[in-house]
Image (cartoon, helix red, strand yellow):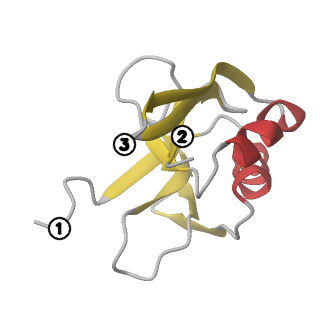
Amino acid sequence: MKNLINWFEIPARDFKRAVSFYTVILELDIKETEIFGTKMGFFPTDGTNVSGAIVQGEGYKPSTDGVLAYLNGGLDLQIILDKIEPSNGKIIVPKTQISPEMGYFGMFIDSEGNKMAIHSPN
């Protein structure tokens, strides 16, 4: 088993707003589609890395409780954190060092009300 996690889904109240939020903060293209009545915005993948989607449909409810997903913050997560609040999110833990070996993390509430985290080596 290469990765313990192989897929994640981020619930959205307003699908277009959520797609816009993650497109801006992560600077990537999100491919939108609908599958079985559920709107899905797929994060890019080359088929070998862990990926996921923004989803809006029955049974998907944004939350600050439950599982916490850590997104890849690149070399320095501060670049992404700086885009959170201008994009209608809220930083709840600023860039914080875990340890010199483990790098840094931060936490935020996205545009939909999900608690998310981000990690980087610097």
Left or right: residue 64 compared with residue 33: left
Q: Nearer the viewer, residue 53 or 106?
A: 106
Q: Nearer the viewer, residue 91 or 111?
A: 91
- What residue lies at 75% left-to-right and 50% top-to-bottom? 25
Q: Nearer the viewer, residue 2 or 15?
A: 2
Under mark 2, the amino acid is Ile
Q: Earlier in the sequence, mark 1 or mark 3?
A: 1
* Pair 3/2: label in front: 3
x and y percent of residue 106 in the render?
A: 57, 30
Real-space CA distance between mark 1 and mark 3, rounded to the nearest whole angstrom: 21 Å
Disc assigned to residue 101: 3
Element assignment for label 3: loop
- What residue lies at 76% left-to-right and 29% top-to-bottom? 89
Left or right: residue 29 compared with residue 61: right
Q: Which residue is mark 1?
A: 2
Real-space CA distance between mark 3 and mark 2, rounded to the nearest whole angstrom: 16 Å
Residue 114 seen from this side: no
Q: Which residue is mark 2?
A: 118
x and y percent of residue 43 in the render?
A: 56, 65
Quarter containing the N terminus: bottom left
Instruction: Answer above or below: position of 111 versus 46.
Output: above
Element assignment for label 1: loop
How many numbered discs, if any? 3
